[in-house]
Each structure stands twice: as structure tokens, then as C-alpha cells.
Amino acid sequence: MSIAVIPSRFASKRFNGKPLAPIAGKPMIHRVYEQAIKAKNIERVIVATDDDRIFELVEGFGGEAIMTSANLRSGTDRVAETASLLNLDPDEVIVNIQGDQPLFESECLDQLVAPFQADSELVMSTLAVKLKDKDAAQDPGNVKVTFDKNGFALYFSRSPIPYVRDEGTTADIYKHLGFYAYKKKFLDTIAALPHSTLESVEKLEQLRVLEYGYRIKVVITAHDSPSVDRPEDIPPIEKRIQAR
């Protein structure tokens, strides 16, 4: 069994107060939390925040929240601080859940942690889904990932990868979903690493891991999950919730 952490900040350049934004009658962070607790192999779900409003909301609906520092570089660093505050075992598997994907399937979390049961040396995994829409592959808002024959990430990019040079040649393109699982001891390693060049250029923190020579297992799932980056992303998601 694993522990899941949902890093949640109030401040956002594109959408301030996003975790509290109502989606079909519930704050987004509440919907994400509800999906997380449905996973079979997650024994505990914690919202890690630096904001009293988010903390109080989570406790108000019966969830578990923890206050973390306001001076952290990324969601990964917030998850790392949470793991340290909880004094977790070095080999504990910790799941980092995207707090802006309220429609994610809880099965994805079980898929994410499954490789750790098969490989005792594994330190990190993430999720990807095959893209069927060519326009989606061109969208820099959809992060793409390519991986080797053993399923370990080669690169993540906002550009389409691989680039198909010759007409008549095809290649599957995979979207990175931004969910991660790590062993606690490796999460500490990531948090201690300086920012990398590729991370700074693409604005993708997972590139820090690759650039320093570590491996990330890519788990292919059939479940895509749209993210809320701006207020205008909410209505389509509400329609999907209502359709259910």
C-alpha cells in the first residue's frame, strides 16, 4: 500500500485560487481528493498546501491536509517536504497527484504503483496515454514523452516527439499525464538536486531527473484526464461530469 499526496497552491499565474474553483458544485481539490481515495492500493491521501483556505476546506469535507512551506520550487518539492514531515520510511512509495485533473481515473494510481511490486530497484514511475488527435500532439500544453524498449523515459517535451521527418512514416505519440510515484529516499534525492538546464528551458521538472542520469518508468494507461489550466477549461469538464 502507498501514500498519495496532492500538492495544492492557491497562487497561480494563470488561474489564482484554482484548487478552490467550483466544478459542478464542488471545489476542484475536493473532486481530486474523492478520486484519489477510490484507488485500491492507496492507504492514505493527503493534501499538502501552503494556504489556510485550502487547508480548512479539506478538513471541512473530512479530508486530511498538512501545511507546508510557501517557499518551495515545485509540487515535487512540496511532496518531498510532506514525506519528511510524516517521517516516512525510505522505501515507502509515495504518489504525487496532479491537483488540477478532477476527472482522472482512480485506477491510474494503482497502475502507477504496480511496477514497484515487480522491480525492487525501481525508484520512480509516471503515466502516459497514447494521443489519437494530431492537433493535441502539436499543443505545447500537452507534454509529450518518448521511452525506450524497456519503458523508461528518454525525454519529455512540449514539442511533438518523436518528430516524423519523412512522409509515409508514422510513430505513436504519447501524452504525459503528470502523475508520479517515487520511493521516499529518491524523492529526497530529487528535492536536493539543483535546477537543470533542460528543466529550465522546457519548464518541466521531470527533466531534472533525466538530466542528472536517473531513470523514470513510464506506465501506459488507457485513461486520459484533462487538466484545468484556466477558468475556460472548467465548462467542458462540467459537461463531462453531468454526462456521467
Image (cartoon, helix red, strand yellow):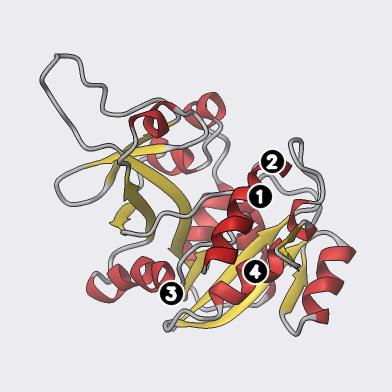
Which residue does the numbered mark 3 point to in the structure image? 91
Q: Nearer the viewer, mark 2 or mark 3?
A: 2
Q: Is residue 99 above or below residue 132?
A: below
**Amino acid on which the number 2 mark rests in the picture:** Glu
**Amino acid on which the number 4 mark rests in the picture:** Arg
The N terminus sits in image quarter? bottom left
Q: Nearer the viewer, residue 116 or 60?
A: 60
Which residue does the numbered mark 1 point to in the structure image? 235
User: Looking at the image, is mark 1 or mark 3 earlier in the sequence?
Assistant: 3
CB contact under 8 Å: marks 2 and 4: no
CB contact under 8 Å: marks 2 and 1: yes
Dot 2 falls on a residue whose secondary structure is helix
Dot 1 falls on a residue whose secondary structure is helix
Task: Count neighbours of disc 1 (C-alpha within 10 A) and say few if under 14, some if 14 to 19, many if 20 or more.
Answer: few
Q: Which residue is rendered at x = 51% and y = 69% of the image?
A: 244
Any part of residue 84 in sight:
no
**Amino acid on which the number 3 mark rests in the picture:** Asp
Q: Quadrant of residue 137?
A: top left
Left or right of 216? Residue 46 is right
Dot 3 falls on a residue whose secondary structure is loop
Q: Position of residue 84 (x, y in %)?
A: 64, 69
Alpha carbons under labels 1 and 3: distance apart? 41 Å
Dot 4 falls on a residue whose secondary structure is helix
